[in-house]
């Protein structure tokens, strides 16, 4: 299972490939040295991440796979439908999934997403526009939302209430 560490504006990001799929893109707080991409898929992932951070890419085109329950897979699939520069609340996500009482379970599944940015869990915010629940740190969520809002010309990160 090849794993590399790539420097991004948000710190070191661990990228893992397994059986022809990217299985993890996760920002770390550790002070690790970047390592070179060792496979064509890892090289393509680094290229697409760099394009995203440069404001040149809004969607990722990578084969991805995460271990999770069918419910978690459904949650992550719904995350992938949130447009670049857009945000939705956990309540809105639960309604889109036809599970209006499942807000906590959906939020928990969002928190188990290991494909940060690629599967954009950072685009889910509190109903009041607050930035809640991001395993890689709220400061990174804020940065990602502001980056996308700036590139998309949206100018804000809060929901229109």
Image (cartoon, helix red, strand yellow):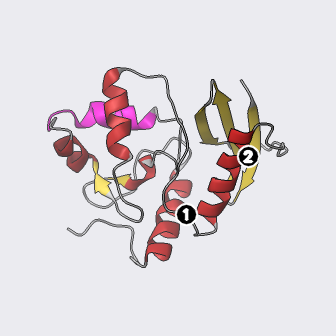
Picture quadrant where residue 155 is located:
bottom left
Report the front residue among 138 and 23: 23
2 or 1: tag closer to the N-terminus: 2
The residue tagged with tag 1: helix, strand or loop? Answer: loop
Residue 99 appears in view: yes
Report the front residue among 153 and 56: 56
Vertical position of residue 33 compared to residue 11: above or below = above
Q: Which mark is residue 57?
A: 1
C-alpha span from label 2 to label 1 = 16 Å
Magenta residues: mostly which secondary structure?
A: helix
Q: How many marks?
A: 2
Picture quadrant where residue 128 is located:
bottom left
Q: What x and y, as percent, mark residue 118?
A: 52, 47
Picture quadrant where residue 1 is located:
top right
Residue occupying image coordinates x 68% and y 60%: 9
Vertical position of residue 146 compared to residue 29: above or below = below
Residue 10 appears in view: no
Q: What span is in magenta? A: 100-111
Q: What x and y, as percent, mark residue 43?
A: 73, 46
Residue 79 in the figure: left or right of residue 32: left
Vertical position of residue 61 compared to residue 63: above or below = below
Q: What x and y, as percent, mark residue 12?
A: 72, 47
Residue 33 in the figure: left or right of residue 21: right
Q: What x and y, as percent, mark residue 99?
A: 16, 35
Residue occupying image coordinates x 84% and y 42%: 35
Q: Quick one: quadrant of the C terminus? A: bottom left
């Amino acid at each position: 299972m090849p794993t590399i560490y790539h420097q991004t504006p948000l710190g070191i990001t661990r990228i893992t490939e397994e059986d022809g799929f990217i299985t993890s893109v996760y920002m770390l707080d550790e002070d690790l040295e970047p390592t070179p991409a060792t496979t064509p898929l890892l090289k393509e992932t680094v290229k697409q991440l760099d394009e995203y951070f440069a404001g040149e890419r809004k969607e990722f085109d990578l084969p991805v796979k995460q271990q999770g329950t069918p419910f978690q897979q459904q949650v992550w699939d719904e995350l992938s439908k949130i447009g670049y520069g857009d945000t939705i609340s956990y309540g809105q996500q639960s309604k889109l999934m036809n599970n209006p009482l499942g807000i906590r379970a959906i939020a928990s599944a969002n928190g188990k997403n290991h494909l940060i940015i690629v599967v954009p869990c950072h685009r889910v915010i509190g109903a009041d526009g607050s930035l809640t629940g991001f395993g890689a740190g709220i400061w990174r969520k804020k940065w990602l939302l502001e980056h996308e809002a700036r590139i998309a010309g949206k100018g804000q990160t809060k929901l229109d209430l």
